[in-house]
Each structure stands twice: as C-alpha cells, then as structure tokens.
Image: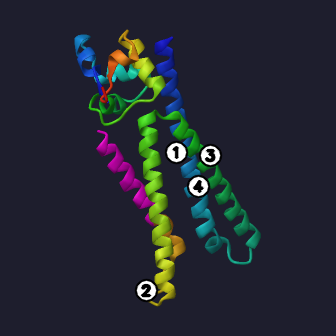
Amino acid sequence: MQASQETDAYRAEMRATGVFVAAGLLWVGTLALARFGPELWGDTRQVATWAAVVANVVAGVLWIVAFTRLLRAVDELQRKIMLDALAITLGAGWVAGFGYVVAERAGLVGDVDVATLLPVFMGVVFVVAFAAGKIRYR
Amino acid sequence: MKNRIAELRSERSWTQADVAARIGVSRQTVNAIETQKFDPSLPVAFRLARLFELRVDELFLDDQV
C-alpha cells in the first residue's frame, strides 16, 4: 500500500508536469500564430486573426488550469517554493507596472512597449525567484 | 523543528531518497525537514512517524519545551 501511494504520487506529479508543459507549448504556439499569422495572411483576413487570438486566450486558460493542477500534484515543499515565487512575481509586476505608469505620466521615462516588456519581466522574476527557492531549500 | 530523522535513517542505512520514496515526497523535502529548514505538514509528519514506527512527538522535538 505504501509503495503504491508513493508511485501514485510520483505518477500524478509526472502526469501533471507533462500536461503543464504541453499546455505551455500550446500557448506559445498559438501566441506565435496570433503574432505572426496576420503578416502571413494579410490584414484583410481579420476573422482568422481574431480566431488566432481567441485560440491563444483559450490555450492560456488551459495553461492556467494545468498550472493549478501541477501545484496540487507536487509535494508541499515544491508547492511552497512555487507559491513564494508567484507571490514575488505578482508583487514585482504590480510595483514595476504602476511605477512605470506614474513615471511615464510624469514625463520621467519615454514611451515603452509595456504590454510586451511587463510579461517578459514577470517571467524572468519568476524564474529567478523559483531558482532562489530551490537553492534555499537545497 | 528539531527531529530525529537523520539519526533514524542512518540506523537503517537509508538514504534521503529512500525515505522520500517511502513517504511520497521529493528528496529535497526530506533534506529540508532534516536540516530544519522546513516543517512538514501533519500528513507528512504522520507518514514519517509511521515509517520509523514512532509517535510524531517522538520523532519531532518541540523547541519550546
């Protein structure tokens, strides 16, 4: 029974990880399609562009669901490390985003493509915070 | 929280990976518990206690006492 429980937990975690990775790749793929598709099929085919954007959003929702399931499948320390990293990422994104808004309104900084840079910034913050958590509990 | 996991593990010649596999957590979790960097949840504490055939309060030592 004990060995079965351990194996079940490991299999569940591996399955959740696989689904998460697959959903992530699907999101990246649909993002690329939404970004570069219009350049391929031209501005006149807005229905196709809308479809690509909607597909990307749907893929994103699936990715979020897969991530929450992954959080439930990993063990408690791994879950703590991920949640700590997510908290730092949310805070950093919030602070950086609004910091930029007020600085830009005050004329202190130039116009920057925040819609692109902020998600990238948050992604980097998450990776660094996650790595720091793994090192802390090594 | 102080605990006797490393001592008991050593008596049985088990690695941290062995303990981790037996209770269904990662090796990193077992290491973090042993080195007092992380306190386990009750279910994990009870699984550890069952593994070493002890009560939870015999396995984990209350720092406040």
Chain of residue at mark 1: A
Of callouts 3 and 4, the N-terminal one: 4
| Distance CA(mark 2)–CA(mark 1) | 37 Å
Of callouts 2 and 3, the N-terminal one: 3
- Residue A18 can be seen, yes or no: no
| Distance CA(mark 3)–CA(mark 1) | 12 Å
Image coordinates for residue A98, horizontal then vertical, percent: 50, 74
The amino acid marked with disc number 3 is Val
Q: Are marks 4 and 1 on the same chain?
A: yes
Of callouts 2 and 1, the N-terminal one: 1
Numbered tag placed on residue A65 in the rendering: 3
| Location of mark 2 (residue) | A109
Tell me which secondary structure the magenta stretch mostly adopts.
Answer: helix
Local secondary structure at mark 1: helix
Q: Is residue A91 left or right of residue A59?
A: left
Chain of residue at mark 2: A
Of residues B45 and A51, the one drawn nearer to the viewer in this rendering:
B45
> Where are the magenta residues, as a range?
A121-138
Numbered tag placed on residue A27 in the rendering: 4
